[in-house]
Amino acid sequence: MKRIIEDPSFLLGNNATYEMGTADGKEWHSKKVIDVVNEIKPSFPHLETLLVAFFRGALVIWKRFTSEFVPGGLIDEATVEEKDLAWMPATNDVNEGALGSFRVLMCWQPQLTLLHYNALAMFEKNKTEAFMNNFFTDPDHKYIHKLARDSSGEEAKRKKELITAAEKKIQLRKEKQQKRQEKTAEKAVRVSNIELIFDLSKVDGLKGKTLHDQLDAFKAAKGPNTGKLKSKAKVGLIREALKQDIQEKLDGTWVPGNMDRNAGPTTDSRQNTTESGEEFDGLDDIDNEESTDDEEEGQEGQVVVTLDINDQHPDWEDL
């Protein structure tokens, strides 16, 4: 820094290089920036003066900052526990802005309602107190008191609306869960009635729904190769896995397991739920009944995760 203060050409000179202008001697982070600065610097006659002033101010802070890290200094000799206690975020972003102000105030006054906070924020932002002192009469104050009394139940009403909305979403998820469980049970019955094909010559002729039915049936019978496939695997992979399972059956190295005709959703089901009705989809596709006979090439299954975000309450617009 001292070198640049004494001779700014280390950064602004026409022949400045990263060896001369960087503290670590490594290449510029962005050579284009340096090129643009050199290109436009003739139109900024005070650029050199400003650069020197910047580095002079930075040098003061740099000395104070680096002194804390010197061997034998406070940070160097601090224990791990002391460093953990001294930790703080690199920025103050979480406390800035309207949302940050709300967060800080709620830490000090956790009993404060959102409606009350919005009123305080608007009161402070709009300099309402000065306006009231200059223009309000006794009837005006009485009217404001009346409005405050009339709105005393608004917070309870807002919370009730949020609870009602949350309960409605939970109910919808439970209904969706029930439908999927019923669909899984129906599919288990259908798959249990599918006759496994053990003729290798017939596999290449399978396509569309017939092919996927055989895949589902072999998976239900715990086929060693088909069991590894997703239901939306490519057609070629499905046929190859079927052939491998059939060959192992013919060789006697695999015996198809029993398929429970009345089997319902199992731990292998894609659908997992919590008591609140939250849903978590697994990796395997549960249903391929929409496959058509013209489907020759499938695609690898994809996981689609949908995140439900609570609707923003109108009162939040004031934040």
Image (cartoon, rainbow, N blue to C red):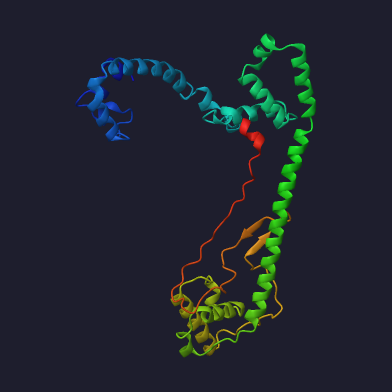
- Nearest the viewer among 247 and 213 is 213
Residue beneath the point at 26% across and 30% down: 36
Locate residue 188, reporting x and y percent: 66, 76
Relative placement, left or right, of 241 versus 151 is left
In this rendering, is residue 240 above or below 32? Answer: below
Locate residue 17, reporting x and y percent: 23, 29
Looking at the rendered image, the quarter that the N terminus falls into is: top left
The answer to whether one can see residue 274 in this image is: no
In this rendering, is residue 108 above or below 243? Answer: above
Looking at the rendered image, the quarter that the C terminus falls into is: top right
Locate residue 39, reporting x and y percent: 22, 27
Farthest residue, direction front: 139
- Quadrant for residue 13, please give it: top left
Farthest residue, direction top: 134
- Nearest the viewer among 144 and 283 is 144
- Nearest the viewer among 307 and 275 is 307
- Quadrant for residue 66, please give it: top left
In this rendering, is residue 92 above or below 294? Answer: above
Farthest residue, direction left: 15
- Quadrant for residue 296, please give it: bottom left
The answer to whether one can see residue 254 in this image is: yes
Residue beneath the point at 80% across and 26% down: 149
Relative placement, left or right, of 165 versus 2 is right
Locate residue 87, reporting x and y percent: 57, 30
Relative placement, left or right, of 14 versus 79 is left
